[in-house]
Image (tube, rainbow, N blue to C red):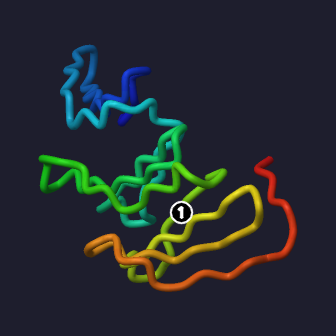
Amino acid sequence: LYFSAQEGILMFYHIKDLQYEIKVCVDISQPISSLIFTPDYTSLLLVTDQGTVYSYKPAHSGEAVKLLDTSSSCFLAADFLTPENNYCVSVTISGEVQVWSLEDGTFLSKLNLGTEVHVT
């Protein structure tokens, strides 16, 4: 079980039978608003309240890679693009959809929907 603490720390909670172990995975020093796994569970997107998106690969442990920093816009959500999971998509409240490379965080494309977006 992966979860985040209020301070922006990603933690792993390993439960086996009646025993458990908590491991600190990474500290991004920003409150994490959501965690999104790829369908094959090889990568995890960490989305912050401040509009920053990080990629974290549990099998490689180590640092989270900053992919996107939209602090100047009203960032709303992000998710992986499947099937290869090499890209992520983000959306702002104003309706701008952006595509990013998970390899190095390169901005690839954007589309303006022309309408305000809400998450339900």
Q: Residue furthest front?
A: 72
Residue at label 1?
Answer: 79
Q: Nearer the viewer, residue 59 or 108?
A: 108
Mark 1 closeness class: few <14, some 14–19, many ≥20 residues within 10 Å: many
Examine the rendered structure and indicate whether residue 45 appears above or below residue 18.
below
Q: Callout 1: helix, strand or loop?
A: strand
Residue 94: give x, y in percent of width and height: 77, 61
- Residue at the spot 36% in from the left edge and 54% down from the top edge: 44
Q: Residue 20 in the image: state x and y as whole percent.
A: 23, 19
Counting from the top left corner in percent of width and height, residue 75 is at: 62, 52
- Which residue is depicted at the point 29% across and 30% down? 11
Which image quadrant for residue 15?
top left
Give the residue displayed 22% in from the left and 37% down from the top. 26
Position of 6 with respect to 61 (left or right) is right
From the image, which quarter does the N terminus lie in? top left
Q: Is residue 97 above or below residue 64?
A: below
Q: Amino acid at mark 1?
A: Asp
Q: Is residue 7 left or right of residue 75?
A: left
Q: Residue furthest top?
A: 18
Count of numbered tags:
1
Q: Residue at the far right: name it.
A: 115
